[in-house]
Amino acid sequence: MKTLLLASALASGGRERACWRAPRVLTPWKPRLHTYERSVQPRPWPDQAKVALSAAGSLHRHAALLRRSGIRPLLIGGDHSEAIGFWSGIASVYGCALGMIWIDAHLDSHTPSSSASHRLHGMPLATLLGQGDRRWQTLLGDHAILAPTRTTIIAYRSYEEAERTLLIGLGVTLISADELQRRGWPQVWQAARRRASRDGQAYGVSLDLDALSPHDAPGVSVPVAGGIDLNHLQRSWRQLRHDRSCKGLEIAEFNPARDHRGRTRALLHRLIATHVPSTRL
């Protein structure tokens, strides 16, 4: 399956402005790059939601256009609120909810009423599951973009109980960092793929770089101690290359301002090259 890059220079939903510079690391892929850039300061709620809704609409249209053309989009960003527009665009092509493997140190499942910070990058998964602020209805419609029982969150280790309670009630499968260590990555990963693609249905994979160790990926806005094994991740990422049920890929929360010695940038290049192998670095 041919893969093409989308880039999201989105910072309004997070806490640090530097995330809007994420697409700048993709210079080697410029001839193949579809960009959406909006260099905005992080904003308080509800102004943040107004800015993000516009950005989400643009990503929605780009992602849907690529899927209708038979191309699998790989989105590089930007704060994780980008996921709302991206995955809703892909789901619109199929007219049904997607399965999802969400790899993240956080649960990203606050609603405006449960979030103390009111930052939108802590709410995208809940929004895609049909929860929270109804202003997104014009973009998402009346149904959830993601199917809860086909959604797995892997490697979370920083969260509030309100998020966990919401997700358990919806039927989402939660794999904490501790459980991942006990069971091992291969078993957890394969189970998540089977769940997401049940009966050959469409699914996606969203990777927040803070799921990795801050040593391996220091260039994130909200680093969390611990993290998944980088070698396991890269092997699993390669498995997706020829998986026709996987309709989209996302790598979020790259913050170049925190990227010590360019480690995160180098990792991004390796992950991109796995799916766009003809690109020369």
Image (spheres, rainbow, N blue to C red):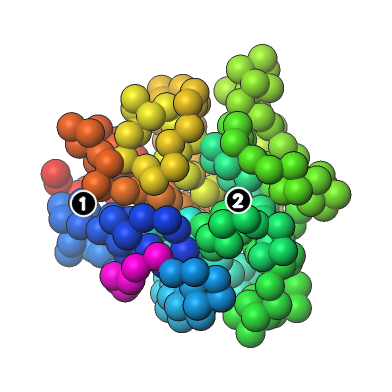
Position of 230 relative to 84 (above/below): above
**Residue at point 72% right, 64% down?**
113
Q: Main secondary structure of the magenta part?
A: loop
Is any atom of residue 224 visible in this view? yes
Q: Which numbered disc flags the more N-terminal residue, 1 or 2?
A: 1
**Residue at point 35% right, 48% down?**
254
Q: Residue furthest bottom?
A: 138
Q: Position of residue 233 (x, y in %)?
A: 46, 30
Name the amino acid type tagged 1.
Answer: Val
Which segment did they paint magenta? Answer: 37-42
**Residue at point 16% right, 55% down?**
27
Q: Which of 118 and 253 is in front in this view?
A: 118
From the image, tell me which residue sits under label 2.
108
Contact, mark 1 vs mark 2 (Cβ under 8 Å): no
Q: Nearer the viewer, residue 195 or 53?
A: 53
**Residue at point 71% right, 57% down?**
114
From the image, tell me which residue sits under label 1.
25
Residue 11 lies left or right of residue 96; in this view the side is left
Residue 94 lies left or right of residue 239; in this view the side is right
Position of 35 relative to 22 (above/below): below
Q: In which quarter of the image is residue 184?
A: top right
Q: Quadrant of residue 216?
A: top left
